[in-house]
Image (cartoon, coloured by chain):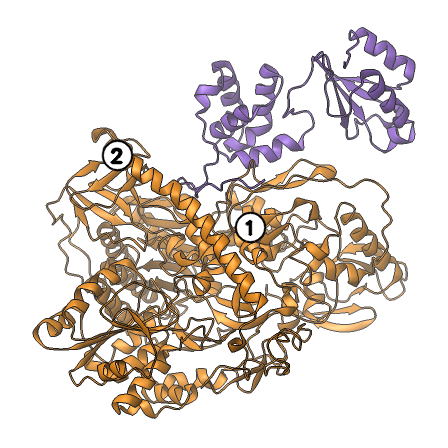
Chain colours: A orange, B purple
Amino acid sequence: MAKIFVDNQQYTVRDGQNLLQACLSLKMDLPYFCWHPAMGAVGACRQCAMTQYQDENDNRGRLIVACMTPVSDGMRVSMQQPAEQEFREQVIGALMTHHPHDCPVCAEGGECHLQDMTVMTGHSVRHYKGKKTTFENQQLGPLIKHEMNRCITCYRCERFYKDYAGGTDLSAQASKNHVYFGRQSDGTLQSEFAGNLVEVCPTGVFTDKPFGDHYSRKWDLQSAPSICQHCAVGCNTSVSERYGSVRRVTNRFNAHLNSYFLCDRGRFGFGFVNSEQRQRDIYLHGKKTDWRDADLITLLKDKNPWLGIGSSQASLEDNFCLQQLVGPENFCPALDPQQEDLLSRHMTILQQWPQASLAQMEQADAIVILGEDVNNSAPRIALSIRQALLNNAREQAEKLRVPAWQDAAVRALAPHNPVPLAYFGYGTSTLSELATIKVLCDPKHAAEQGFMLANLLSGQAPSPKAHKVDPQIQQLAQILKNAKQPLIITGWSAGHPALLAAANNIRNALAQLKPEHDESMLCIVPPETNTLGLGLLAQQGGLSGQQLAQRLTHNTCNLMVLDHTQAPFNEQLTKLGASANHLVRLTQLRAGHKNELTLPLSTFSESSGSQLNYQGLIQSHIPATKPSGQCMPGWQWLVNIGKLTGHALGNMTNLGQLRDNICLHYPQLVAHWLSDPHGQMALQTPRTSGRTAMLANQTVHEPKPFAESLAPYKQSMEGTIAGDKGEQPLAYSWSPGWNSNQSNHKFKDEYLNGPLTAQKGVLCISANPSKQWVNWQMDWSKVNKAKWQLLPMQKVFGSDSLSLHALPIAQLKVQAQIVMSAAQAQSLKLQAGQLVSCDDNPLLFQVVISSQVPKSSLLIYAPADQYFPLTHCDALILATQEQTQAYRAQLANLTGTQEAQKQAQHTRFLTQDQTIPIRFIQGAN
Amino acid sequence: MSKVIPIKQVQAYAEQTVDYRQVLSQSEIDAIEHECALYESRPAAAIDALQIVQRERRWISDESLYAIADMLCMSATALEGIATFYNLIYRQPVGQHVIHLCNSISCWLNDFQTIADHLRNTLNVEFGQTTSDGNITLLPNVCLGCCNKAPALMLDGELIENLDIASIDKLLQSLGGGKNE
C-alpha cells in the first residue's frame, strides 16, 4: 500500500496502479477518456491531467497525466488547482473542435461519457472559430451504426477491437484532424465482439443500431438485472424496456464472468422476445382458447401417466416444477443418447473439479484446448483466453520495471513472450490461429492425445494403447509441468464424451504433480444456458430418451414438454408426440404443431428465473417488463396444473415458497436466494419522464410501478437506487455526474488490477477432488465403414436457436457449410461456393475449402434451425443447376423478407408506443 | 444511402481478397520480398511495399492496396491505416508534379496564407486537387523540418525554401504552367 496526498488530503491506495485508477477507486471525479479499466493506459487524450509536487514546500508543481503515472509512496498531487483545471478544460475544448453538438439527435445522449466529462471540466463556452471537419460514415452491418463526426479520437475503439478482441477490420486511418476510425470499405464488422464498441466509445460514434431504430433515452428505460440466455457462460446483463417492448441488453459488470464485455450473440440475441414468432396465447388443437376451457381442463386432468421432458433453455424453477409434477422417475432431461452421455460425464467431473471463472482463466500461463471450438460455443471465454496470452509479456514488462497497465509496452513485448497455447481439434478460429502447438485431429484422436498427455504427466493415469507419443505432446507435457496456472479447456461442441474424460485425467495428473500448490484450472463448456441445471435435477434419476420413447409406444402415456427451439429436438418431439395420448407443450416460440395443448411461456425479460452456468454457479434474473398476452412463467403454469390435478405442487402460492421448496431438495441453494434482492429495487431511474402522462389517453390515474405477479419481490421507482447497497445487483449503472456506463467505478472498491478476490455466489455442484481416473474403453481405430465422418462445427450466429429469432442475428446467420481440404475438393471436382448434399439428405451445404480438416473427415455446420442427423456419409452430391438457382433465389429473397420483417416490426412497435397497452403497467388492468 | 448489407462472409476476416500475383509485377514482388526478408514479420514491410508499388504506378489504387495486404498477410484495413497516415503515399492519382506546401506553425507565421492563396489562384485548384491538364497536384504538408527557412514547399521530393510570390511564379513556369480550365 502507498500513502498519497491528493489536494493535501492523505489517502492509502494500493501499489502498482496508476494515479487515475487510484483516484477513481477513491470515488473522486477525475475526467478521462482513453483509459479503460480492462484495457490499460496509453495516455492518448491527456484529459486526466493533475499536478504533481516534489514535496510539501513545492507549490508550483508540474502537470502530469494521471493514467500514465504510477502511484508511489509519499506522492503529492493536486486535482482541484486552477492550473490543471484549466488544462483539462482546454483539452476537452480541443477534443471537441470537430464535435457536431448533435446531442438531441444522438443515441448516446443522456448516457454519454463526453457529455459527463464536458460538464465535469466546466467547458461551457466554445472558443474554436474554425470550420469543422466532416466525415462520411460507413455501413457497418445490422448491429452497429457509425457516425464519425462525433469522434474525439480517444482511440478506444481501435484498441478494443484490434488489440483486445483481435479484430482485423477496424483501424485508425489518416492523421491530424482527419483521423478516421472505420473499415477499409463499407461492410459488416466481422468480429463477434463488435457490439462492445457501443459501450467502449465514450461518445456516439458507434451506437447500437437495433436500439437506435426503436429508441428511448436511458433515463426513460426500465431496466432489470438479468442473465444472458445464449450460451453457458451466464454473462450478467441489464435488460431494458419501455412501453412493454424490450429495447436493449447492455453489459452488467461481473468481476469473475463477463467483466466489461459481452459477445454480439448475447447483446443482440434478445430480439426473440419481441418477435412475431412469440407464442402469446393458449392454443388447444390449433385453436386459441383460455384457461377456463372445459376441454383443456379435461385434458390436463387425464388419469393416464404423465411423462415430462425438461429443457436446458428453461429455468431451474420451471424444470423443477415439471420434475415434481410428473415425478422424477417420469422426467427426462435429454432426448439424445449422446447428450445424456455427455451430461452424466460432465456432472461426474464437476463433482471432482471446480471450473475456473473467466477472470481466473485470464491468469493462465499455459492453455490446452481439447477439441472445443470456444470461439463459437462460448465466445466470451475465447475473449478471456486472448487476454491470458499476454501474461508472459506482462511479467516481462514488470521485470523491466514497466507496470503491466502500460498497454502499448506490454503489446510490444508480446510477440517475444508468447503464452503457450495448445490446440487439439479441427477448423479455423481466431484461437487456433494463435496456437503455439497445433494438432489437427478429430475429437476421438484429440481425446486419445489427451489421455496420453495425462499419462505423460502422471504415470498413474491410464494410457490408451496407442502408437508412439508425438514429440509435440512431450513438449506440451514439459510446458504444463513448468506452468504455474495451466488451464485445460474442453466441451460439448465436438459431441464426444471421451474429451471430457481426457480433460479430467489431465487435471488429475496436474494435481498430482503439484500436491502443494495446485493452481491448475479446468473449464468444460456445456452447450446451453441451463444445461447444468438440468444436470442437477437429473441426479435424482429419470428417464433416458430411449426409455421415454418405449414408455410412449408401449403404454398409454401423456407427454408434458418444456420446449427447446433446436431443430433436432423439434424433430424428435414430433415423432414422440405422435405416440403420446396427449401432448402439452410449454413454449416461448410458435412451432406450428396442431395436436397439442400449447401454453405460452414468458421469457427471461418477463419473469424471474434461475440458471446454472458452466461452473454450476446459480444466477437469477429479474423481469423488466410484464408478460405479454396470456404468457406466464413455466413454474406458474405447472403450479396451476398441480392445482387442477390435486398435486402437492398446487399448494405453492408464490415464487418464494417454490424456491424454499427447491431448497429442501438442494440445501446448497439457500445461501443464493437469501442473498437475492429483497425488498424494493428501483428498476426505473429517478428522472423517468412521462410517468403521469403516458397513459393519459386511456386513464387519468397514475399507474403503480410494475411488479411481477406471485414474486415475493417488489420493483419500484422509489426503492433502492442502483448500487446503493453493495450486495444488490445493478438494474442499470448510474451515479450522479456519471450517466454513462463508466459510472461503474462508483460501485466497486477497487478498479481492477488488484489481486483477484474470490468469486461471489453459490456453486450448486460442489467439487470434491477425489482424484478418480477415468478409464476409457475405446477402440481407437476407425470403426465406421463410411467414407467420411462428419465432424460438427458451430457458428456464433447460427448455432444458438433462440437468437436466430432476433432479427439482426438472423440477418447475420451463417448458412449451412461443409468444409473440406483442397485435396478432397480436387478429387471430388468441387469448388468453394458450390452446393452439395450428403447421401440422401436433402439439406444443401456450401462448400468451403480449408487446410484444417482431419483425414477422412468433413466438417459440417448446420444452423440450429435446420435438422441434419447424419454423422457419416459416403457420397457428396453436387446440386443441380435448378437447385443452385433456387437456393440463391431463396437467399436473395431472405434478405428482402428480413428487411420487410424489420419494417413491419418497427411499425408494430410504433403503434404500440402510441397506445401504450395498459396491461403493461401494474394496477391499471 | 441505404445499401444492401452483405451477409457475413464465410471466410472470417477476408475483406476484399485479391491474389497479389495477379496484380503486382514480378519486379515489384521481388523488391517487396527483399524488404520482407529484412524484417521480423511480413506486415513490418508495409511502408516499403507501398513505396515500391507507388514508384512503379505513381499512386496506390484500391486494387494495389488489396494486393499488398494479401502479400504481406495483413488486413486491408490495417494497411489502409498506414497508407493514409503518410502524406507521401498517394491513395488518389496525382499529376506529373506534386507540390507539398508546408502549413505548420513557422510557415504559417511567415505568411503561408499568401503563398497558399497565390498557388491556389494561379493553378486554379484547391488543396488535394490536380490541374485539369494532369500536370500539377497541390497538397498541404505537416512540417517539412526547415522552420528557419520558412515558408517552404517540397516539389517531387525536392525541398524549396524561403518562398515568395516571385519564386513561386518562376517555379511554376519551369514546370510548364499547369492550367485548370
**Residue at the left extreme, as displayed:** A554
Tell me which amino acid carries mark 2.
Answer: Glu
SS class, disc 2: helix
**Residue at screen point 65% across, 25% down:** B89
**In the image: residue A771, left or right of residue A132:** left
B81 vs A715, nearest the viewer: A715
Mark yes or no: residue A363 visible. Answer: no
In-front residue for pair A823/A639: A639
Tell me residue A520's x, y (percent): 39, 64
The residue beneath circle 2 is A882
* Alpha carbon separation for disc pair 2 and 1: 36 Å
Left or right of residue A581: residue B126: right
Q: Residue at x 32, y 59 (%)?
A: A491
Quick check: A184 left or right of A263?
A: right
* Quarter of the picture holding the N terminus of chain A: bottom right
Which labelled disc corresponds to residue A144?
1
Residue type at mark 1 is Ile
The secondary structure type at the circle numbered 1 is strand
Chain label for disc 2 = A
**Residue at 77% in and 25% down:** B127
Q: Quadrant of residue A562?
A: bottom left
